Amino acid sequence: APIGKYVAEEGSSEATLAPRGTFVDSVGATAPTPAPPGRYVPGVGATEAIVAGLGSYVPVEGATSATSASEGYYVPEEGSSFQTPSPAGKYIPISGATSLDDAIDAPVGKFVAEEGSSEATPAPPGSYVPNTGSSFAILASPGYFVPSAGSTVQSAAPPGYYVPAAGATQATVNPAGTWTGPASVAPRAASSGLKVDGDPIVGPRFESDRSAIVDLGTWISVVQFRLNVTNSADFLGGGDPLTQLTLKSLEVSGEAASLVRQLSDPLPLILDEGEREELRFQISEANGASSFQISILTDEEAALGSDGKRFEFEFNFSVNQSAEYEAFLETYFTEAELLDVESTRFLADFDGDGIDNGMEFVFGTNPKDFATSTEAVWLPRTLILREPEGDQLALAFSLPVSTIGSIELSIQVSDTVEEGTWATIASREGNGEWVGDAVVEIDEPSDGRVSVLVKDLERLSAELDEKRFMRLEARVNGDVL
C-alpha cells in the first residue's frame, strides 16, 4: 500500500484511502493514523496532518478541522491542543485571537471578574471602578453613594442627607429635627436652642435648656463656623414661636476669645416669626487646642425692652498649622477662593471628586480638577497578588518624589475594619525610609513621582468567610486625614 493508503485485510486487491481526520505517512500500512491533538486532516488520502495555526487549536485526535479561539480566549502558538483564557481584568471581544496583546483592559467604570471574558461588565449601581484593568467593582463607602451603573467615582452624601452602609445607590434625607454634614453615615439630633438647616457646620449637644458644648474639630489654619438661629418652637425648646425675637447682644469670652471675629452683621437683631439668621464667625492665628464661650442675650420671657434669657455656647477646637499646606493652597487657588476657608480646609472636597483637599495635598493632585484617570492611579488601591506560596494582599500608590516633611504615612491591616483592630505594617515620615514588617517595593522615579507597592506578609486564606483589609492612613502634623 502506498503512502496515503492502507490495506487492513489479507487477500485485498486494492488499497483504501486514509479517511478524513487520519493520515498514512509510510508504505505498507495496515491502518491509518488519527491526527493527534493540535493537528487535523480535512480530506482523504492524506500523508500527514496539518498543524493548527495561530489563533486556532485542536483539542482531540482525529479532527478534520481546527477550531478558532473563542471570544475571551487566545492561542499564541501553532499546533496547540487548547486555548488560553484572557486573565481577569481583561477581555477579548473577537474570536481567533493569537496573543494576550489582543486582550483589552477593562475601562474605568467597568470590570472583568472572570477569566475568558469577551466583554467588560459595567459597575452596578452602588459601586464604582476608578482604574482600568480592574477585576472587581468597589462598593460605595458608608457616607457615599453611586446612583447609576458604569460609574468611576462615588458621590458624597450632601449636607442634609446620610448613607448608613456600603453599596448605596442613593442618600437618605435626614428625618425632621436632625442634621448632617457632607459624607455622613448617620443623622445627628438638633437640640432645642438651635435650629439646624441649610449647610450646617456645627451641631451642639445641649447639656441644659440654654447651654451647649460644640466640638469644632481640628483645622490646619483658619477656622470658620456658623450658628443658624430661627425664631421657632425649636429655638425656644417647645411651645409656640415668639411674634418677634430680639437677639440683643453677643459676648465672646474664654481662652481664645481674642482670636474670634464675628463675620455676620453685629447684634442687636430682630427675628420675625419663623425667620432664620446665620451668625458667622472666624478664628485666626490660633495654634494648638483651645476653647472659648459665646453668650447670646435675648428678650425671651422678658418685659418689653428688658433683658430675657441668655444662650450659652462653649466651643472646643484645635489648629495644627502647616506652612506647606498653605503654600499648596496658594499654588492652586485664587485670592478670592482662599477667602472661602470652608471650601479650602483640609477635609473639604473643593472639586467634588470624592478626594478631600488634604489627600490631594498628600498625593500631589490638583484639588480644583476632578480626578483624572491618571491621577486616580496615583491614589491607593488594593491588589491581590498571585504567588506560589499563596495569595497576598498589597496596596499600590504613587507619591511625589519629594514628600512634605510634615506628612506621615502608615499602611495598616485588619481582619474586621473595626477601630482598635488596625495594625501598622509599614510607615514613613516625610522623605524618610519605610520601616515596618511589610515588604515595600519602590520603583525608580519617573516624571517627578515614585510608585510604591506595600505587601502584607500574611497570606490570604481560601476560606470565603475569612476577610483581610488594608488601608493607608495619612497624618499631617499628627492629625489623621
Image: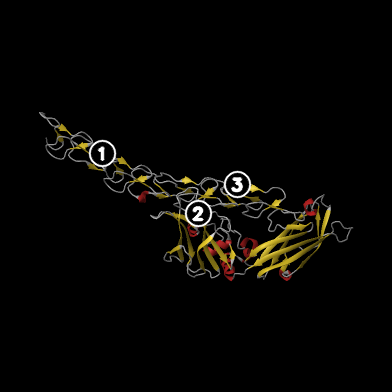
Callout 2: few (<14), some (14-19), or many (20+) C-alpha neighbours within 10 Å?
some
Quadrant in which the N terminus appears: top left
What percent of the width, then of the height, locates residue 39?
A: 25, 42
Q: Nearer the viewer, mark 3 or mark 2?
A: 2
What percent of the width, then of the height, locates residue 398?
A: 48, 62
Q: State the residue in front, 465 or 238.
A: 465
Residue 307 placement, left or right of 431 = right
- For marks 1 and 2 on the same chain, the one whose residue lies earlier in the sequence: 1
Residue type at mark 1 is: Glu
- Picture residue at 43% right of the left edge, 44% below the top: 119
Callout 1: few (<14), some (14-19), or many (20+) C-alpha neighbours within 10 Å?
some
Callout 3: few (<14), some (14-19), or many (20+) C-alpha neighbours within 10 Å?
some
Disc marking residue 170: 3
Secondary structure beneath label 2:
loop
Disc marking residue 468: 2
- Picture residue at 56% right of the left edge, 69% below the top: 406
Q: Nearer the viewer, mark 1 or mark 3?
A: 1
- Picture residue at 73% right of the left edge, 67% below the top: 292
Secondary structure beneath label 1:
loop
Q: Is residue 4 in sight in this rendering?
A: yes
Secondary structure beneath label 3:
loop
The residue carrying mark 1 is 61
Q: Is residue 340 in sight in this rendering?
A: no
Distance of label 1 from label 3 (alpha carbons): 57 Å
